[in-house]
Image: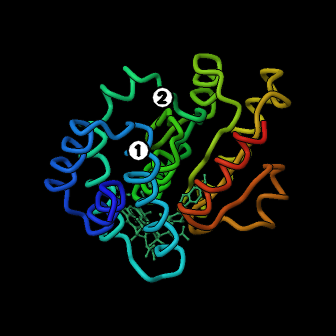
Amino acid sequence: MSICTQISELVQKGKAKLVKEEVAKAIESGVPVADILNEGLLAAMGIVGEKFKNNQVYVPEMLVAARAMNAGMEILKPHLVEAGVEPIGKVILGTVAGDLHDIGKNLVKLMLEGKGIEVVDLGIDVPAEKFVEAYNEHGSSLILLSALLTTTMGEMKNVIEAFAKAGLRDKVKFMIGGAPITETFKNEIGAEYYTADAATAASLAKEIITAA
Ligand code: B1M
């Protein structure tokens, strides 16, 4: 078994300490850092994400795997910078105003990072104007909104309207998600994409970024 496959399996099992050790060993023995990233750490999160989508694993397993991936990333990051391995793109993510739920949003973030996408995470209870400010600062054209409450999902429309008001609606695309969100609601508020789970959100974000 190649060392990258071994790293992938350790991440899937959530063995953070062993992941660190194996990543360090792989770097030392000259395995290209991009291979360690893509065939080891990111491949693992892809597999875990698919299993999560198919209800073969659940939130705790996913969080443990993500923690192991992050442990490996800690070791790998300085070497990635040195080797000039760039993220494939950047997105802005947040839970909308009035809403404090972030477990799902954080899973979406983990899966995005697992696809090599940089995430500007604005956190929870994010007012519409904050998304516009983040766009002006970071220039990412894909904005991801999460909401868990029927009382806050309407805030997604306010975010879209804030971009329209700022004359920026045609510069960005919106992906929305969260337990009460549906495809019909997406159409009602004029967002571009709806995804039901974190793994699909990350796969679609990758598709959108690479097609741009
Ligand atoms: Co609250 N809460 N909560 N809560 N909470 C729910 C959502 C609720 C369904 C519980 C219930 O009544 N059965 C209900 C909402 C009812 C409704 O609106 N229809 C509810 C309520 C009412 C409330 C309060 C109002 C309670 C009160 O104070 N009276 C209050 C509101 C606070 C606020 O936000 N202003 C409140 C508070 C809280 C806690 C703070 C205690 C805590 C949140 C802690 C935290 O997030 N850090 C909490 C929790 C934990 C829940 C439940 C139990 C679990 C939510 C969760 O994390 N699920 C929830 C009941 C339930 O779902 N069983 C409930 C796991 C998570 C992985 O799933 O977030 O759906 P989820 O994310 C999924 C997908 O939705 C998707 O991907 C994830 C996984 O693949 N997804 C996206 C999410 N965002 C996405 C974005 C995307 C794409 C996919 O693209 C951008």
Instruction: Determine whether, in the image, residue 97 is placed left or right of residue 106.
Output: right
Secondary structure, mark 1, is helix
Q: Give the side of residue 178 with respect to residue 82, left or right.
A: right
Tag on residue 85?
Answer: 2
Neighbourhood count class around disc 2 (C-alpha, 10 Å): few under 14, some 14–19, many 20 upward? some
Q: Residues within 10 Å of mark 1 (few under 14, many from 20)?
A: many
How far across and down, in percent of the image, does residue 51 sit? 47, 75
Residues at badges 2 and 1 in contact (C-beta under 8 Å)? yes
Q: Secondary structure at mark 2?
A: loop
Is residue 63 at all visible to an observer of this figure? no
Question: Which of the numbered marks, if any, corresponds to residue 37?
Answer: 1
Looking at the image, in which quadrant does ligand 1 appear? bottom left
Does the closest atom of ligand 1 sit within 8 Å of the Cβ of label 2? no
Q: Is mark 1 within 8 Å of ligand 1?
A: no
Q: Looking at the picture, which amino acid does disc 2 mark?
A: Val
The amino acid at mark 1 is Leu
Marker count (numbered): 2
Q: Nearer the viewer, residue 118 or 84?
A: 84
Picture coordinates of residue 119, whole percent (x, y): 50, 37
Tell me the quarter of the picture where residue 77 sits. top left
Identify which residue is drawn at 58% across, 16% down.
137
Residue at x 75% of width, y 54% of height: 193
Is 37 on the left-hand or right-hand side of 203?
left
- Residue 147 at x, y percent in the picture: 56, 56
Task: Reply above or below: 60 against 57.
Answer: above
* Residue 193 appears in view: yes
Instruction: Locate the C terminus by quadrant.
Output: top right
